[in-house]
Image (cartoon, rainbow, N blue to C red):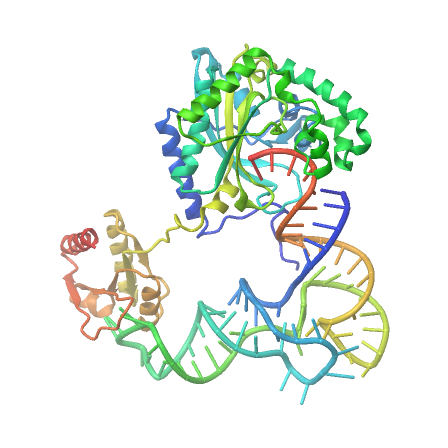
Amino acid sequence: MKQLQSLRGMVDVLPGETERWQAVESISREHLSRAGFKEIRTPLLEVTDLFSRSIGEATDVVSKEMYSFIDRGDRSCTLRPEGTAAVVRAVLEHGLLNKGFQRLWYCGPMFRYERPQTGRQRQFHQLGVECFGMNSPTSDAEVISIAWDLLSCLRIEGLVLEINSLGASLDRKKYRDELVDWLKVHFEKLDLDSKQRLDTNPLRILDSKSKQTQDLLQEAPQLKDFLCEESTQRFLALQEILKHLKIPFKVNPCLVRGLDYYSHTAFEITSHHLGSQATVCGGGRYDGLVGELGGSPTSGFGWAIGLERLLMLLGDSIHRNWIPDVYVVNRGIKAEISALVLARKLRAFDLRVQLDSSGASFSKQFKRADRSSATWALVLGDDEVTNGEVRLKRLHSNKMSSTVKEHIFSSSDLEGLMSFLLDEKVTR
RNA sequence: GCGGGCGUCGCCAAGUGGUUAAGGCAGCGGCUUGUGGCGCCGCUAUUCGGGGGUUCGAAUCCCCUCGCUCGCCCCA
């Protein structure tokens, strides 16, 4: 029979890795809650329409990357390709915006049907925040700083923050038309990809990787010249505030972002240690989205961090193996049961206890005890059961010592044993 | 969807047409049936992702297929 395997682009996280995930998750949770963010959990599955309406029909995400299917009730459903749309939906559905502000975070899997490569999977995980009802450049800066600080406190180095303003949606529309007209005149000088994008998504031509296209764009109309006064002012203000916060940034006039709902501030945090998928965190302002999805006009700002990419940058520094305090060596039917009873009691005292239930020889069990790196071996065999005692032996990882001290405790004196272990644990 | 690279034991790997497919790690058993780390001994792939073909003979050559991987597009 052929060996079954996971679907392409769907990745298992194995023991050893899960510890790193847990560390990142708990640090993030703490970091966000200190800043007043509350967690929201939305379903993985939504009505397809939600995404096509919010992300944009013509975007790559919607036009070719969604996992969609028709369910038994004849509804078109889609596995969420990103988090924002669903959060907005939930927030509207439950009237969370009636209170005015909301600062929310979420974490979980997203799905996009793409060819997997470094830093890209079909099921991947995002940690994101969404803020509603705040509209000042200061709030943009604060939310950006929260992402920046989270990445810094995880000690990720070599990050670059890039920002741009996409202007109000009207500005962008005007610019888009102007750019398309101009590019049509120079159509022959464009690279093949850009030629195709001219119809579908012309703004994306701006960050084309083709050298000749980039050279050509030097002469093209610039988005910043189309920003209305208000937009220009708020972008300048944002830059001032970031400088004041001592967060280094680069203005990247070509930073466009692929989702339709962005307006005004857009930003990305990238790292050159990631291969060609360099973006760890991306986000921006989406003042039109809530209205678009049927709510009363409410400004929004958010970002998402790709957790797989984050983990790639993290190294092994936060990786901590589970090491037992006590490894319980036992042999014989009565001893086995006593050992189990004892293990439960020790665990209740917050000790990490590994119980050997192999029934193997003492020699074998000690080998495993040693390899587990446990501090103590607790020995329980027929002799001990008969004498009503347990033996405790310190394990040495470096040197063989012929004078290993064994401590013997009466099995009726479990409190003595536990306080001994706990004392030792504290002083270690 | 389009390119490039790669697929030999749980993991790392040697092997590029010729007798039984190296080696290391891990695992298991033993030396040591109640005491670990070191050491020594033994065991663990009828088979080289799968299917065809060429050949007296294929892990090695050819074709197809599947998978992985890196890149393009795009994004976290």
State the residue in front, A347 or B71. Answer: B71
- Residue shown at 22%/65% (left/top)? A393
> Is residue A344 found left or right of A43 in the rendered image?
left
- Residue shown at 76%/26% (left/top)? A183
Q: Residue A351 placed where, x, y %?
A: 26, 51
* Location of residue A154 (image quadrant): top left
Q: Is residue A217 visible?
A: yes
Q: Residue B39 placed where, x, y %?
A: 38, 81
Mark count: 0
* Location of residue A378 (image quadrant): bottom left
Q: Is residue A71 visible?
A: no
Q: Residue A173 placed where, x, y %?
A: 68, 16
Of all residues, the one furthest to the front in this rendering is A219
- Residue shown at 79%/33% (left/top)? A189
State the residue in front, A324 or A130. Answer: A130
Q: Is residue B52 above or below residue A111?
A: below
- Residue shown at 68%/26% (left/top)? A203
Q: Quadrant of the C terminus of chain A?
A: bottom left
Q: Is residue A269 above or below residue B54?
A: above
Q: Residue A416 placed where, x, y %?
A: 13, 55
Q: Quadrant of the N terminus of chain A?
A: bottom right
State the residue in front, A301 or A212. Answer: A212
> Is residue A70 found left or right of A358 in the rendered image?
right
Q: Is residue A17 above or below residue A204?
A: below
